[in-house]
Image (cartoon, rainbow, N blue to C red):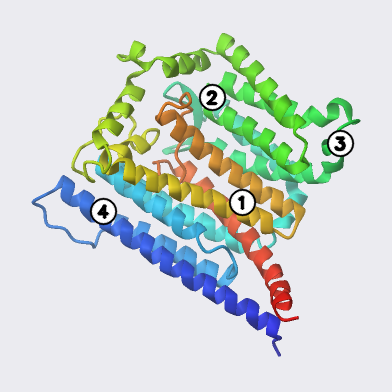
Amino acid sequence: MKTNEQVGVRTRGYERRRRELELVIVADLITIFAWVLGYFGLHPNGHITLAQPWLAIVVLAPLGAHVTNRYFASNADTILLPIAALLNGLGFVMIGVLDTQEAHLQAIWTLLSVLAYVGTIVLVRNPDSLDRYRYLLAIAGIGLLFSPIIPGIGEDIGGERLWVHFGSLSFQPVEIGKLLLAIFLSSLIVEKKDLLARLRGGGLRRFGPLALTFGIALAIMAAEKDVGFALLIFVTFVLVMWIGTGNRIYLLFGAITFVFGLVVGGALLPQVHQRITVWLDPWKYAATTGYQLIQAQYAFGIGGLSGTGLGLSHPTVPVATSDFIFAAFGQELGLLGTSAIIISFLLLTGAGIRIALRANGEFSSLLAMTLTVILALQTFFILAGVIRVLPLTGMTLPFLAYGGSSLLANYILLGVLMRISHRSNQHADPREAQSSHP
């Protein structure tokens, strides 16, 4: 016989999933509406049918994820999946406006990514169990980070060696590698928290993880010519060390190390120097390396407040489906559209922080925070680069930009957050029920 507490938990779980389904349907309707607008923008005299297999994949995949949540994570957060579905859907529409073939591939990657999300939800029943495999995951993560430099499988695209290929399949292993390192870092900080948080004692051992991370970041920049992910990994480690220990000395040490790395990287690595100089004055290099940034500024100017409309002005920004998709949205949806996108990412970040604060285990809490920091920093770095607040990093905008590796990794990240949320809410609800009925 079920107790009142168990019934209460089940009822609250049902309400969460009902709200999630409603929000997913809203996200799908917005995606369909945007696709119709984009189609008529490109084919004003064309006959339209909604029986499009690629659109159907993008619309139905989140519903399949919702069904998985209903049976395996009924108490998980309500808004994470709908926001991801909305961003994924809008990104698919914009990619379709710019490049039909890439939109087809993005739809396939959406299906594979949602399947990876489902696998994460089903297999990772207890997120705390990941703590036991930290060294194995760390070795795998570092291996993935440096796999692009292996002769025969590494591939150089756009001057950066970030890709590996097996036959016709190619992907960025660093996207998965960053998630594995996040698990390792969270586990390490929880185990060594007393030593790492100590204001005195411990010597240089306290800074060992940061020094190792700094070395990995420099190695990535030197070997793979990748500034973006090196910066992402290092800044994530610094912030999480501070959050996990509460010791602000890591922020100071991280800032000093970052400035040192910037000076050394700018002097020894051409790609770092080039990105900084182009950022400072793109007009000086308008015909070469500054062309992308200048075209992005033009795109935002053309879009103005409300944009030109989906499909009504073909954005001329280079690599508009990936690195500069935010500029493409700025041209076609204007300030209002890009503001809505930023708000969506802020909601994702806020939901992740809430999950971390409510988690019922120290490791789960720090892991949720680490994954949220990764998502937030990657979003901030690419947006700041496109609008010229920071130098370009060359990363993809989560869920929105074209890129199977990024989409796959971010859906797995979402799955882990949902698992942590389900477990914490499952344990918290009975206590809430008791407190509300003294």
Identity, as a three-letter code, of the amino acid under mark 2: Val
Residue type, numbered disc 1? Ile
The residue carrying pointer 3 sits among few (fewer than 14), some (14 to 19) or many (20 or more) residues within 10 Å by Cα, namely some
**Residue type at the position of mark 4:** Trp
Location of mark 1 (residue): 353
Marks 2,3: beta carbons within 8 A: no
Q: Quadrant of the C terminus?
A: bottom right
Identify which residue, 299 or 51, lies in the foreground. Answer: 299
Instruction: State which mark lies toward you, 4 or 3.
Output: 3
Q: In this figure, which residue is indicated by the disc labeled 3?
A: 198
Residue 5: x percent and y percent?
Answer: 70, 81
C-alpha gap between disc 1 and disc 4: 32 Å
Which residue is at the far top?
267
What residue lies at 87% left-to-right and 38% top-to-bottom? 195
Distance CA(mark 1)–CA(mark 3): 25 Å
Q: In the image, which disc is placed on residue 227?
A: 2
Cα gap from disc 2 to disc 3, whole angstroms = 32 Å
From mark 1 to mark 2, how far is it between C-alphas?
Answer: 27 Å
Q: Residues within 10 Å of mark 2 (few under 14, many from 20)?
A: many
In-image side of 160 versus 210 (left or right): left
- Please tell me how crowded label 1 is: few (under 14), some (14-19), or many (20+) other residues with Cα within 10 Å: many
Tag 3, which secondary structure? Answer: loop
